[in-house]
Amino acid sequence: MELSLLTLCYLIGSLTFIIGLKMLSHPDSARKGNLVAAVGMAVAIFGTIFLYEEEGKKLGNYEWIFGGLILGTIVGVLAARKVKMTAMPEMVSLFNGMGGACAALISFIEFDHIKDAFAKGITIEIHAGTLITIFLGLIIGSVSFAGSVIAWGKLNGKIKDFAFPGQQIFNLVLLAATLVTAGYLVFNLNAENYWLFYGIAIASLIYGVLFVLPIGGADMPVVISLLNSFTGVAAACGGFLYDNQVMLTGGILVGAAGTLLTILMCKAMNRSLTNVLIGSFGGNKFSGASASQGPQGNYKEISISDAAVCMCYANKVIIVPGYGLAVAQAQHTCHELEKLLEEKGVAVTYAIHPVAGRMPGHMNVLLAEADVSYDKLQEMEQANDEFKTTDVVLILGANDVVNPAAKTDPSSPIYGMPILEVEQAKTVIVNKRSMKPGYAGIENELFFQPKTSMLFGDAKAALQKLVTEIKAL
């Protein structure tokens, strides 16, 4: 009876993961979907704690189990409540890294049972499938953990891009050596060579670091998505080891969703997934001239009153949100501006680049928080068709995703990346704090074009002034 009840708990958990993931596909149901999946996870966790038995014995050690649950819950709740929207990508990377570390630790624990048997001189039969799963969990989990920690450091500015000559080849050799060694141990593991397991762990951690270190610019959201898929696959390996349907289902869902998202984002960035895997994705492969060149001409500023008049008497306005909007926490004021313009008969929509911000879907989450209608969010292809008939484009803190160099400058690090072609609109207003380059570290020639005007200042302050000015018109 207990076994069937535990199986039912796992079935409930698996179904809620699937339902929750489906609900996450739309902002209107995303919050409920998250809660549904969380409830399913809770059912699976407590079902395991109280119903799981092995050789007639229950888990025990309840003080350690609940101590860990309580501590983790407190830390997680406090961290999630206190994190700023601008720091959300770092938190996603860090939490994802913790998932990878847990998967790797499962492999460590299971391998320790084998090592203890060797130490005691006990001959045990080890299935190749079990060893393959242990090594896969170790390698993928370690890469995900190390890579996510580096991504966290790069996103908050504590770690800078780094690459050395021949790094791609070194990465490939290191990865191949790690996999070959793991394959050798699968079929030849014994009391003399088991220590190679720990060498594989160290090599995987080094590869995870070197894999992410050279990545920079607008490529980081793709890497976060890829690392997330790694964590899912590593968790699925744990599900195989323990014959746990919930871990298996959850891991497969995360791995599949992360992989599909990575492929879609690579397509949007016009990048190769192969280059992502060998660590050359977004690396600093461009000439120094592109990164360090000075201003490309004269730019012109626009006053708050002129910008307000320009938008107020337009027929169509498209807003392009970027990381600067998140930094200023200006999404609610932006929504207020949108509603105010619509009251005056102006059609307002938003153009969303697939990798705008610092994590997948960053701008969608940001605008959903301010109750912006999902129907007003246009994907890149749709927005590019609309720019030709748009009177005013208001760019709020976006830089690299609207940089024409992606189409015109082969030496640029973002060359070949599809962009929002805002220069096709009649008037372009760019809100930025200063003329400093964006995340990719290059100048934006859009800022010096005749139809572009710069509106300097904090995004929230500038939008508040625009709202006040438009109300007075």
Image (spheres, helix red, strand yellow):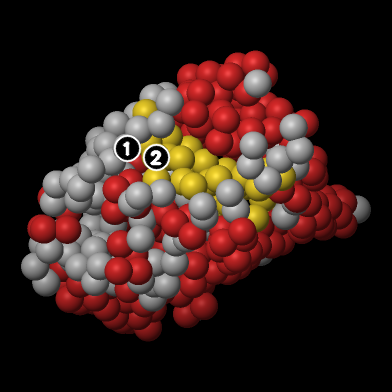
Which of the labelled discs sits on residue 300, or is there none?
1
Estimate the x, y position of residue 404 in percent, counting from the top left. 35, 60
Of residues 71 and 418, the one nearer the viewer is 418
Which of the labelled discs sits on residue 453, or is there none?
2
Image side of residue 24 versus residue 423, left or right: right
Of residues 144 and 395, the one nearer the viewer is 395
Q: Secondary structure at mark 1?
A: loop
* Residue drawn at x 37%, y 28% as measured from the top left: 456
Circle 1/circle 2 CB separation < 8 Å: yes
Task: Name which quarter of the figure residue 111 lies in.
Answer: bottom left
* Residue drawn at x 37%, y 83% as measured from the top left: 187
Q: CA distance from mark 1 to mark 2?
A: 5 Å
Sequence-first tag of 1 and 2? 1
Image side of residue 305 versus residue 366, left or right: left
Question: In the rendered image, which quarter contains the C terminus?
Answer: top right
Q: Is residue 87 above or below residue 51?
A: above
Query: Crowding near pointer 2: few (<14 within 10 Å), some, many (20+)?
Result: many
Estimate the x, y position of residue 264 in percent, counting from the top left. 54, 69
Image side of residue 366 versus residue 120, left or right: right
Q: Amino acid at mark 2?
A: Ser
Estimate the x, y position of residue 114 in percent, counting from the top left. 41, 63
